[in-house]
C-alpha cells in the first residue's frame, strides 16, 4: 500500500516528481562517494533505471555530470561501467544541458599514460558523437589514436571513428584519406583492415565522398580476393549504396555478378543477404533483367540452401511494385502465357519441393502474383497457388516441429491473402482446412482455427452444415488441461462463434459448457466469453461471466466480470425486438437500460487509479445515452400518431373542448427537432471518443465509427422525413459499395444503413410531403433494425496491445501546485513546456507519433484592482505549437501576457499527430496559476494620483530623481 501511495504521489505533479527524483539521485550519489568499489559500481549501473523513471533534463544533466566525475577520477573498471551506462542511455544524451563541462571532465582522461584508459575514453567519445559531432579536439584524438601501437586503443579509435563519421560530414571527409591509406598500407595487419573497411559505409554525406569511397571499395574487391575481405567489402559496399541511394542499381548488378560467377558459397550467401536488404529497402530500383538473372541462378543452382536464399529475395520482391514491372515489361517476342515466365516456372517447381522452406517461398510467390497481377493470362496461377497451399498444409499439419509450424504460418497467411483478393476461391480453401483439421497436431490445429476465423470474418463462408464437423472436433479435444488444449478450446470456440451467424443453439451451448467444465481453467472460460462478446453471442457470454464471478480473488476483478455480465444481459434483451411491435421494443430497451445502469456502476467500481478504464466507461455511457435517445424517439413517434393532422386539429379542439389539441403537432415537431439535435450531439461525442483512442486497434475504431454513423443516419432520417423534407440531400450519405468490409458486424450494420437510406429516399420521393404515419413507421423500424444487430465489444474494450502516454513538465512551476507564480503585468512570462513520450511493450504497433501539438490557454479567474480599458488582444492567451519528439523527448516555449491584474489559470493541453496527419486528443492536461502584479512604477503613479498630486509634478519629481 505504501509503495502504491508513493508512486501515486510521484505521478501527481511535476513538483512532487522533482522531490522524489532528487532523493533518488542523492541516494545514488551517496553510493558514488562510497569508499568501496562494489558500492560505487552498483550505484553507477542503477543510473539507467533512474533515467527511465525520471526522463527530464534537469535530473539527467546532474546525473551525467556526477558520472563524468566518476569517469575522471575512478579506475578503469568504473570507467567501463560509466561507458556501458552511457551507451544504454544514448537517447537521453541530448538532454545534457552542460555539454561542455561533461565533455571536459571525460576528455581529461585522454591524456593518461594508460592505453586502456585512453581506449575507454575513445569509446566514451564515440558513444557521445551524437551530441558533440564537430568537436575538433575529439577528432584530433581519434586520428592520433589510429596510429597507436596498442591494439586495444586502435580498436577503440576505429569504433569512435565509425560513430563520428556517421554524425559529422567534416570528420568523414577528413578521415576518409587516412582510412584509405591504412587499408592500402602494407604495414596494416589484415584483421585490422577488416575492422577499418566498415567505416566507409558512413561516407555518404555528399556525392563526391560517396563516389571516392565506392572507388576505393571497388579496388579492394579486386585487389584482395580472399573470402573474408570480399565479404566485408561487399557488405560495406551495399550499406554505402543503401545510404547514398544513387548507386543501388549498380550494386544490385555487382551482387548478382558475384552470385552467378563466384564459386565460394560464403560469398554467394553474403550476396543473397545483401540482395534481400536492397529488395526490402528499394524494390522499385529492381529492373526486369535483375529479377530474371536471379530466377536463372535459382533455377540452375544445385544447392538447396542457396536456392532458399534466392527464393526469399524473390518472395520479398513479389509482394512489391517490382513484380508488376517484371510482367509489364516482358519482351514482345516472349510467349504470352503466364506459365512461360521463368519466375512462374521457378515458383511452380518449388511448390512441391522436399524442403519445406523452399516450398513455402514458392507458394508465397504464386500467391503474391495472383493477388497483385489481375491480367487474364495470369488467372490459371490461382489454381496452382491453391494446390501448392493445400499440399503444404497436409505436410506441415502432421508435424509439430518448430520449422514445420513456421512454414504452416506462412502457408495460412498466404491462404488468408489469396481469399481476400480472390473471394471465389474461399470455398475450396475452407473445405481443405476443415478436412485437415481432424488429423492435424494440436499446435497446427490452433493456427488453422485462427486462419478459419480470419477468413470467416471477411467472408461468410462457414455454412451451418460445417458446424457439425466443428462440434465433433470440439468434443474430441479430450479432458487434458495442457496449454495447447486450452488454446485449442479458445480457437475452436472462436470459429464456432464466427460461423454461427445467428444465436447459438442450446445444443452448441451445452457442448461448449460441458467441455469447459471438464477440461478448462477459469482463464480459458474468460477468453471464450470475451470472444463471444466480440462476435455478438451475448447469451453465451452472459452465462460464462456468471459462472466466473465466484472464481476471482480481487474485488476489482469481481466488479469487472459483473459489469460484463450485465452488459451481455442488456444486449441479450435487445435480440427479442420485432418490427412493427413498438410497445415491446420500448419494454426491451427499458430492460436493457436497467442492466446497463447496473453494469456501469460495477464498471466504475472495477476501475483503479492505475487502470481507470476510461475507454470502457466512455463507450458504455454513450451506449446508454444512445439507447435512451432511441427510446425517446420511439415514444415521440407514438405520441405523434395520437396528435390530429393540422387540417382538422382546430375542429377537434373545439369539439373536445381541449385547446392543447390545436398545437399538439407543433409540440411534437419541437420534440423531433430536439431528438435530432440529441443524435447529432451523440455523434459528436462518439467522434471525441474515437479521437481519444490513440492506442486502439483498427477494428475497435471502426466499431466506434459505425456507432457514430448510426447516430448521423437517424438524425438525417428525422430531418428528411419530418423537419425539412424539401431540402434533404441523399448524395453525401450514399454508402461506398467498394469499401472492404472487415467483420460480420460491420457487414450487417452497413446492410441496415443502406436499407434505411433506401427507405427514407423512396418515401421522400414518392410522397411529398411525407405522411406522418409512413415517416413514423420508417423511423421506428430503423431504430429496431439498428438495435437488432448484436453489438460487438471489440478487442480494445478488453485488451490494450499498444500503450502510449505523454508526461508534461512546466517551468517555472511552483513548489506547491495550489500556489500561483508571481509575474509583473508589464512583463511577459516565458513558459517552458517539456514532455516525454512513454511507450508500453509494443511501441508503434497500430500507429506512431509524428508530432505533438501543444495548446496553451489562460483564463482570468479573479480580478484585483481597478478596471482599465485594455485592448481585447491583451486579455487572453491562446497559442498552439507543434513539436516533433526526438528520442521520445520534446521541448518548446511560449511567451504569455498578463496585463490584467489578478489570478490567471494557465492550461496546457497536449494532443498527438500520427504519421497520417490525424490528430488524436490523448492529453494530458496540466494547469498552473499565475498572479499578475502591478509593476512598482505604475503603482507609485497610481498612489500619487489618488493623493491628488498633479501629473506635471509627478513628472518633475521623476526627472529630479532620475538625475541622481
Image (cartoon, grey):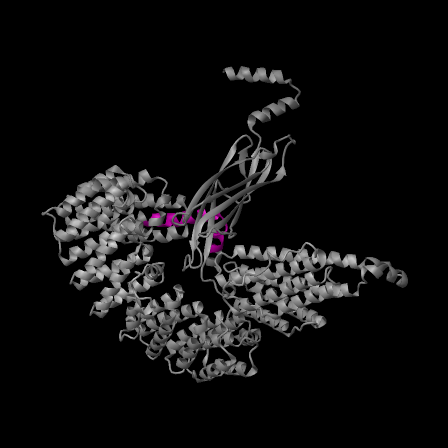
Q: Position of residue 121 (x, y in %)?
A: 23, 45
| Residue at image location 62% in from the left, 70% down from the top | 788
Camera sees residue 112: no
The answer to whether 866 appears left or right of 290 in the picture is right
- Residue 460 horizontal side relative to residue 952, left or right: left
Judge by depth and name the residue closer to the eye, 820 or 433: 433
Q: Is residue 49 above or below residue 939?
A: below
Q: Quadrant of residue 671?
A: bottom right
The image position of residue 767, as x and y in percent, is: 72, 62
The magenta segment is 6-31
Q: Residue at x 49, y 71 (%)?
A: 459
22 inside magenta stretch: yes
Q: Which residue is farthest front?
A: 333
What residue appears at the point 39 percent right and 63 percent down from the top-left corner? 372
Chief secondary structure of the magenta span? Answer: helix
502 or 957: nearer the eye? 502
User: Could you tell me residue 716's position as x and y percent?
Assistant: 65, 58
Residue 938 makes an appearance in the image: yes
Is residue 725 shown in magenta? no
From the top left corner, tell me how far across and down residue 216 is, in percent.
18, 47
Q: Nearer the viewer, residue 413 or 738?
A: 738
In the image, residue 390 above or below residue 222: below
Q: Is residue 79 left or right of residue 409?
A: left
Determine which quarter of the picture holds residue 789.
bottom right
| Residue at 32% from the left image edge and 74% from the top image edge | 404
Q: How many marks?
A: 0
Amino acid at each position: 500500500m505504501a509503495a502504491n501511495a508513493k508512486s501515486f504521489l510521484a505521478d501527481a505533479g511535476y513538483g512532487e516528481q522533482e522531490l522524489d527524483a532528487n532523493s533518488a539521485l542523492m541516494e545514488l550519489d551517496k553510493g558514488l562517494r562510497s569508499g568501496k568499489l562494489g558500492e560505487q559500481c552498483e550505484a553507477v549501473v542503477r543510473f539507467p533505471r533512474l533515467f527511465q523513471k525520471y526522463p527530464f533534463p534537469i535530473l539527467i544533466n546532474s546525473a551525467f555530470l556526477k558520472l563524468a566525475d566518476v569517469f575522471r577520477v575512478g579506475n578503469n573498471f568504473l570507467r567501463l561501467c560509466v561507458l556501458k551506462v552511457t551507451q544504454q542511455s544514448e537517447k537521453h544524451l541530448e538532454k545534457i544541458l552542460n555539454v561542455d563541462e561533461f565533455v571536459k571532465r571525460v576528455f581529461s582522461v585522454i591524456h593518461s599514460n594508460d592505453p586502456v584508459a585512453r581506449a575507454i575514453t575513445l569509446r566514451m567519445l564515440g558513444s557521445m558523437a551524437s551530441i558533440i559531432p564537430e568537436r575538433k579536439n575529439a577528432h584530433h584524438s581519434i586520428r592520433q589514436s589510429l596510429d597507436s601501437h596498442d591494439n586495444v586503443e586502435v580498436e577503440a579509435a576505429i569504433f569512435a571513428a565509425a560513430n563520428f563519421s556517421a554524425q559529422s560530414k567534416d570528420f568523414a571527409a577528413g578521415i576518409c584519406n587516412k582510412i584509405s591509406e591504412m587499408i592500402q598500407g602494407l604495414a596494416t595487419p589484415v584483421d585490422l583492415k577488416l575492422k577499418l573497411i566498415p567505416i566507409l559505409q558512413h561516407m555518404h554525406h555528399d556525392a563526391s565522398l560517396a563516389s571516392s569511397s565506392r572507388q576505393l571499395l571497388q579496388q579492394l574487391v579486386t585487389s584482395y580476393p580472399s573470402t573474408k575481405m570480399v565479404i566485408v567489402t561487399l557488405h560495406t559496399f551495399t550499406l554505402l549504396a543503401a545510404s547514398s541511394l544513387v548507386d543501388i542499381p549498380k550494386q544490385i548488378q555487382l551482387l548478382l555478378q558475384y552470385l552467378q560467377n563466384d564459386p565460394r558459397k560464403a560469398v554467394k550467401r553474403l550476396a543473397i543477404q545483401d540482395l534481400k536488404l536492397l529488395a526490402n529497402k528499394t524494390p522499385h530500383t529492381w529492373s526486369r533483367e535483375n529479377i530474371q538473372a536471379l530466377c536463372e541462378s535459382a533455377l540452375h543452382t544445385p544447392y538447396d540452401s542457396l536456392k532458399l536464399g534466392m527464393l526469399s529475395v524473390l518472395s520479398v520482391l513479389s509482394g512489391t511494385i517490382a513484380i508488376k514491372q517484371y510482367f509489364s515489361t516482358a519482351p514482345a517476342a516472349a510467349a504470352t502465357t503466364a506459365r512461360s515466365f521463368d519466375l512462374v516456372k521457378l515458383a511452380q517447381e518449388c511448390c512441391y519441393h522436399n524442403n519445406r522452406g523452399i516450398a513455402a517461398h514458392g507458394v508465397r510467390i504464386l500467391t503474391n502474383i495472383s493477388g497483385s497481377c489481375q491480367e487474364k493470362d495470369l488467372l490459371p496461377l490461382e489454381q496452382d497457388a491453391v494446390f501448392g497451399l493445400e499440399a503444404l498444409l497436409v505436410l506441415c499439419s502432421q508435424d509439430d516441429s518448430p520449422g514445420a509450424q513456421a512454414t504452416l504460418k506462412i502457408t495460412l497467411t498466404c491462404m488468408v491473402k489469396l481469399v481476400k483478393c480472390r473471394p471465389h476461391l474461399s470455398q475450396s480453401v475452407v473445405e481443405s482446412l476443415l478436412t485437415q483439421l481432424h488429423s492435424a497436431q494440436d499446435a497446427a490445429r490452433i493456427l488453422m482455427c485462427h486462419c478459419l476465423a480470419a477468413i470467416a470474418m471477411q467472408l461468410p463462408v462457414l455454412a451451418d452444415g460445417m458446424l457439425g464437423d466443428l462440434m465433433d472436433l470440439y468434443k474430441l479435444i479430450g479432458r487434458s488441461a495442457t496449454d495447447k488444449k486450452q488454446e485449442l478450446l479458445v480457437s475452436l470456440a472462436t470459429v464456432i462463434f464466427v460461423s454461427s451467424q445467428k444465436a447459438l443453439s442450446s445444443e452448441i451451448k451445452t457442448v461448449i459448457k460441458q467441455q469447459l467444465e471438464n477440461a478448462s481453467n477459469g482463464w480459458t472460460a474468460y477468453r471464450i466469453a470475451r470472444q463471444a462478446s466480440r462476435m455478438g453471442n451475448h447469451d453465451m457470454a452472459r452465462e460464462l461471466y456468471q459462472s466466473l464471478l465466484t472464481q476471482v480473488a480481487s474485488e476489482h476483478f469481481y466488479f469487472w466480470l459483473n459489469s460484463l455480465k450485465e452488459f451481455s444481459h442488456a444486449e441479450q434483451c435487445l435480440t427479442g425486438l420485432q418490427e412493427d411491435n413498438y410497445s415491446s421494443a420500448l419494454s426491451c430497451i427499458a430492460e436493457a437500460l436497467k442492466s446497463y445502469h447496473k453494469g456501469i456502476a460495477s464498471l466504475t467500481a472495477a476501475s483503479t487509479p492505475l487502470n481507470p478504464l476510461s475507454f470502457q466507461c466512455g463507450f458504455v455511457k454513450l451506449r446508454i445515452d444512445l439507447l435512451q435517445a432511441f427510446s425517446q424517439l420511439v415514444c415521440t413517434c407514438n405520441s405523434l400518431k395520437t396528435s390530429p393532422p393540422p387540417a382538422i386539429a382546430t375542429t377537434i379542439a373545439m369539439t373536445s373542448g381541449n385547446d392543447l389539441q390545436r398545437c399538439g403537432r407543433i409540440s411534437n415537431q419541437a420534440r423531433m427537432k430536439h431528438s435530432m439535435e440529441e443524435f447529432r450531439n451523440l455523434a459528436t461525442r462518439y467522434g471525441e471518443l474515437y479521437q481519444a483512442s490513440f492506442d486502439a486497434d483498427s477494428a475497435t475504431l471502426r466499431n466506434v465509427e459505425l456507432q457514430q454513423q448510426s447516430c448521423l443516419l437517424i438524425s438525417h432520417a428525422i430531418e428528411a422525413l419530418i423537419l425539412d423534407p424539401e431540402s434533404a440531400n441523399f448524395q453525401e450519405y450514399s454508402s461506398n459499395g467498394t469499401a472492404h468490409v472487415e467483420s460480420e458486424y460491420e457487414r450487417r450494420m452497413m446492410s441496415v444503413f443502406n436499407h434505411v437510406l433506401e427507405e427514407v429516399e423512396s418515401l421522400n420521393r414518392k410522397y411529398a410531403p411525407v405522411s406522418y404515419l409512413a415517416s413514423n413507421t420508417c423511423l421506428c423500424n430503423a431504430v429496431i433494425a439498428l438495435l437488432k444487430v448484436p453489438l460487438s465489444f471489440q478487442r480494445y474494450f478488453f485488451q490494450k496491445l499498444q500503450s502510449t502516454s505523454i508526461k508534461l513538465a512546466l517551468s517555472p512551476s511552483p513548489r506547491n501546485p495550489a500556489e500561483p507564480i508571481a509575474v509583473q503585468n508589464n512583463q511577459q512570462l516565458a513558459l517552458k513546456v517539456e514532455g516525454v513520450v512513454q511507450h508500453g511493450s509494443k511501441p508503434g504497433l497500430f500507429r506512431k507519433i509524428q508530432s505533438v501539438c501543444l495548446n496553451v490557454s489562460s483564463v482570468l479567474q479573479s480580478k484585483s484592482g481597478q478596471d482599465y480599458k485594455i485592448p481585447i488582444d491583451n486579455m487572453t492567451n491562446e497559442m498552439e505549437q507543434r513539436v516533433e519528439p526526438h528520442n521520445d523527448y520534446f521541448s518548446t516555449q511560449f511567451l504569455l501576457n498578463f496585463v490584467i491584474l489578478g489570478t490567471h489559470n494557465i492550461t496546457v493541453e497536449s494532443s498527438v499527430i500520427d504519421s497520417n496527419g490525424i490528430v488524436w486528443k490523448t492529453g494530458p492536461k496540466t494547469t498552473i496559476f499565475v498572479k499578475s502584479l502591478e509593476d512598482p512604477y505604475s503603482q507609485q503613479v497610481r498612489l500619487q494620483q489618488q493623493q491628488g498630486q498633479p501629473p506635471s509634478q509627478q513628472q518633475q519629481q521623476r526627472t529630479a530623481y532620475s538625475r541622481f
